Image (cartoon, helix red, strand yellow):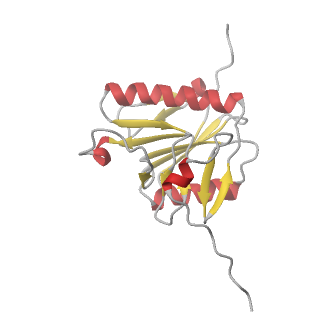
């Protein structure tokens, strides 16, 4: 006879009170320390997040968040994309963003691959994002310098250095040359 182990049910307050020495996700009741990312990973996220945020705010399209922002999925998981965008339509009636977690996934979720990411782990996140309201997902591969574009759990486009990221109808009018994500240092 097998006895099922009980999984801890995390409250938002407990999850937010976790030590700040790591970045966490809650996956199937288990706390997962996402660890720190390297400088390249962080710079790509900051550059894309900053570019996207400036565009989104100036066009009053919604809000952009960084990797420290968790989103609560229907199954209780808490996911933290590297960059995320929530459209203004989903923020109607809100004067201030919640101090806690947004219910559902962002309209646009961006994952920047790290050497420790597995194909299964990224695929599971993408599936979960779409099951919870995402309309667009970008997966950025720094080592190979490409971006995969998703409108469902299967990739729809493979973008290389000469291509442009396009916000499509999710972030209307936003475009960015893929090459800018991987620009070499020139001082």
- In the rendered view, would you say 27 is above or below 139? below
Image position of 144 (left or right of 46): right
Which residue is located at x 63 percent, y 37 percent? 146
Image position of 170 (left or right of 126): left
Residue 85: give x, y in percent of width and height: 43, 40
Q: Which one is in front, 156 or 4?
A: 4
Which residue is located at x 55 percent, y 26 percent? 47
Quarter of the image for the C terminus: give it: top right
Badge count: 0
Q: Which one is in front, 135 or 14?
A: 14
Which residue, as the protein is rendered here, is positioned at the far top?
Answer: 187
Residue 156: give x, y in percent of width and height: 52, 50
Which residue is located at x 39 percent, y 26 percent? 55
Which residue is located at x 50 percent, y 34 percent? 165
Residue 14 visible from this viewpoint: yes
Quarter of the image for the N terminus: give it: bottom right
Residue 79 visible from this viewpoint: no
Which residue, as the protein is rendered here, is positioned at the far bottom?
Answer: 1
Image position of 119 (left or right of 18): right
Residue 76: give x, y in percent of width and height: 51, 63
Which residue, as the protein is rendered here, is positioned at the far left?
Answer: 93
Q: Which one is in front, 129 or 104?
A: 104
Q: Splitting the image into 4 quarters, where does residue 104 fall?
A: bottom left
Residue 120: give x, y in percent of width and height: 68, 59
């Amino acid at each position: 006879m097998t006895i099922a182990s009980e999984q801890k049910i995390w409250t938002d307050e407990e999850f937010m009170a976790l030590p700040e020495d790591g970045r966490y996700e809650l996956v199937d009741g288990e706390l997962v320390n996402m660890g720190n990312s390297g400088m390249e990973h962080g710079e790509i996220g900051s550059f894309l997040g900053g570019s996207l945020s400036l565009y989104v705010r100036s066009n009053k399209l919604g809000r952009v968040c960084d990797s420290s922002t968790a989103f609560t999925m229907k199954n209780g998981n808490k996911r933290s994309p590297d960059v995320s965008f929530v459209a203004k339509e989903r923020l109607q009636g809100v004067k201030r963003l919640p101090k806690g977690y947004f219910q559902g996934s962002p309209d646009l979720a961006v994952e920047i691959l790290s050497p420790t990411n597995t194909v299964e782990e990224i695929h599971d996140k993408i599936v979960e994002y779409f099951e919870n309201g995402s309309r667009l997902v970008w997966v950025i591969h720094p080592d190979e310098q490409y971006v995969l574009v998703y409108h469902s759990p299967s990739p729809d486009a493979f973008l290389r250095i000469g291509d442009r990221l396009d916000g499509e109808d999710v972030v209307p009018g936003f475009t960015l040359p893929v090459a800018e994500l991987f620009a070499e240092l020139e001082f």
